[in-house]
Amino acid sequence: MKKNTLHKLLDHIDHIDGEDLQRFFVKLAEKQGFFQQVFEAIRDGLILLDDKSNIQFVNQTARKLLNIDPAHTITTQDFSLFLGKDCPWSSIQESKTAISRDVEISYPEHKYLNIFISPIGESVQGHLILIRDETPRYKENEENLEAEKLNALTLLAAGVAHEIGNPLNSIGLHLQLLNRKTRKLAPEQRQEFEELIKTAENETKRLDVILKQFLQAIRPSKPQREPHDLKLILAEIIQLLTPELEQREIQLTIEIPDRLPLLSLDPVQIKQVFYNLLKNAYQAIPPDGGTILLKSDYTDDSVYVTVADTGCGISPEIMGSIYEPFLTTKSNGSGLGLLIVRRIIKEHGGSLTLASQPGEGTTITVFLPRVEKNIRLLPDAQS
């Protein structure tokens, strides 16, 4: 409604028939309700302020994004906290210009917000604040960045396979030939040469393993998924690693139910996942021994397996980039184990959580979706 029209209406309000005036206010209320519904339907947060910075309207999206209780009356101090000390509300009023600011919130949940503030009215009679949740865009950018890294590593892998793989095989072959020739030497000379050749062979084999792991992590094969019993796969891995655990005097505690739901998975890849996790766990435990907990259970949606060790743990600095390739805390590690594990779990539609405290150990939990999910119905309402 134009300002002149409103003034004319107020000047002649005494001469308007009562029924006409009633109909006018009914229509005005309907329009106000209509615009309120529109503002509430907007997916962005919206706040309207008058010329004295009194808040005239706040939609529910704004309250949700700013984590403000519906019963709480919002003031400029509430959203000034999100703008930061370097952007006080008083300076915004004085500037009389539109402002766009990106803010990061860590509590109660991690979010990225864009707050746009613009003056409204012919003579700056108030302000309009729009709050947009940019968290999905940030997450998408992170995923795209990770995909670009993997694509770059894929190109690098092709060069590595060609430039290192073939010479490595040749070195291994020539070491075998040297080993045969040393057998013809005198015993005192043979022992020295055999030790040198053995060291070179061991390092060659280690480099070959790193190369294969790298290629496997970067150029993954599509999982051949079939219904399998995860408990049987875990039993095979336990049997395989038991001698190593006993030699290191590590106690393995197993908490697995008698029966687990069938899962659609690639047994070879899943075996590699838990082999890597258990191997990482016992390698993190000091020489004087420790314990590893292997626990599994299931919910209506998934089966989960937890591997918890009492090892050295992971520092916060490393935790932030734990899935970066070639990042390792072990002197002889390749830094590709967790990268391979996460890729395989993602290919199976699952997820991975990792918690660690330096000096107290690490806990990794793998969640794998069930083939058939149980659907729970709400109980009948009691009258």
Image (cartoon, rainbow, N blue to C red):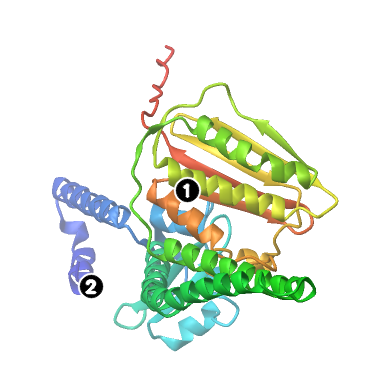
Q: Earlier in the sequence, mark 1 or mark 2?
A: 2
Where disc 1 sits, the SS reads strand
**Quadrant location of the C terminus?**
top left
Of the residues tagged 1 and 2, which is closer to the observer?
1
Residue type at tag 2: Lys
The answer, for residue 161, to whether it is visible in the render is: yes
Residue beneath disc 2 = 3
Where disc 2 sits, the SS reads helix
Residue under the point 67% across and 50% down: 281
The answer, for residue 321, to whether it is visible in the render is: no
Task: Judge by depth and name the residue closer to the eye, 351 or 176.
Answer: 176
Give the left or right position of residue 151, taking residue 10 as reference: right
Residue under the point 46% across and 58% down: 65
Task: Judge by depth and name the residue closer to the eye, 52 or 169.
Answer: 169
**Quadrant location of the N terminus?**
bottom left
Quick one: which residue is furthest to the right in this view?
288
**Image: 303 above or below 178:** above
* Spatial CA span between label 1 and label 2: 59 Å
Give the left or right position of residue 32, taking residue 111 as reference: left
Residue 98: quadrant of the picture: bottom left
Residue type at tag 1: Ser
Residue under the point 77% across and 52% down: 360
Q: x, y (%) of residue 335? A: 58, 66
Q: x, y (%) of residue 189? A: 76, 76
Task: Judge by depth and name the residue closer to the eye, 105 or 179.
Answer: 179
**Image: 109 above or below 18:** below
Q: x, y (%) of residue 195? A: 72, 71
Q: x, y (%) of residue 332? A: 67, 67
- Specify the label residue 51 is tagged with: none
Residue beneath disc 1 = 351
Q: Is the residue marked by circle 1 packed among few (<14), some (14-19), or many (20+) residues within 10 Å?
A: some
Residue 163: quadrant of the picture: bottom left
